[in-house]
Image (cartoon, rainbow, N blue to C red):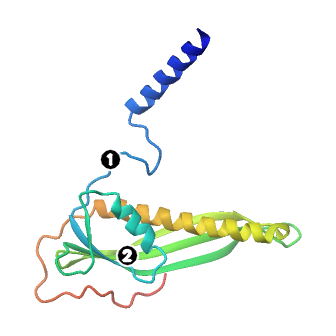
Amino acid sequence: MKHCLKFALLAGFALLLTACGFHLRGLGGSLKPLPFSTMYLEATGKSIEADLRTVFARDPKLSVMSEPKGAQAVVSVVSENQSKDILTINTGGRINEYQLTYTVVVRTVIGGVPVDPDMVVTVRRSLNYSDNQVLGKQQEEDLLWADARRDAAEQIVRRLAYLKVPAAPLAGPVSVKPDAVPQP
């Protein structure tokens, strides 16, 4: 009897959680639809490309084109930057913690009209450091960089969903290739 009561209580709790809209991050939940249904992703050679393609693939109404012709939007990864800075030092002058910063700049062109300003996404992670565990810390650092890229890709797609579609295209052809952008 106690076992059935515990099971019923657990099932009731699970129903309450789902009824309020609770879901794990990245699993379900309604995403705001993107303001375009076809797009071209220009991120060749960038480490965030695979993560962006994965996030875009979650939207069943979005078609990622293999070339920019015919795409309603062109999303270009202009630059990405990784930096590892010392965050804390102990009393002996040894490093205790690093701050990993991943920054990506994305340019979006919708209907031939560039959306200004370029989108800049910065993700920071802290990495505790110990000289005794150099190999393990290198693996942890690689995992943190991968997590930062996934988080940046999620943020980019969420921000794209809130872009306003430009009213009218500019006169003359507009290049989809990014201009030289100063590094942040």
Callout 1, which amino acid? Answer: Ser
Going 25% across and 81% down the picture, which residue do you hit? 67
Residue 132 vs residue 81, the one in the foreground: 132
Q: Going by the image, does 71 lie left or right of 107?
A: left
Q: Which residue is mark 1?
A: 30
Q: Which residue is mark 2?
A: 106
Quadrant location, the N terminus? top right
Q: Residue furthest top?
A: 1
- Give the crowd class for mark 2: few <14, some 14-19, many >=20 residues within 10 Å: some
Callouts 2 and 1 close, C-beta under 8 Å = no
Compare marks 2 and 1 and give the one earlier in the sequence.
Answer: 1
Q: Position of residue 40 (x, y in %)?
A: 27, 75
Between circles 2 and 1, the one closer to the viewer is 1
Going 12% across and 78% down the picture, which residue do you hit? 169
Going 42% across and 62% down the picture, which residue do you hit? 155
Cα distance between the residues tagged 2 and 1? 24 Å
Q: Going by the image, does 130 lie left or right of 109?
A: right
Going 23% across and 80% down the picture, which residue do you hit? 68
User: Which image quadrant for residue 57?
Assistant: bottom left
Residue 101 vs residue 116, the one in the foreground: 101
Callout 2, which amino acid? Answer: Val
Q: Going by the image, does 11 lie left or right of 67?
A: right
Q: Position of residue 162 (x, y in %)?
A: 28, 60
Which element carries disc 2, helix, strand or loop? strand
Residue 58 vs residue 158, the one in the foreground: 58
Q: Residue furthest right?
A: 92
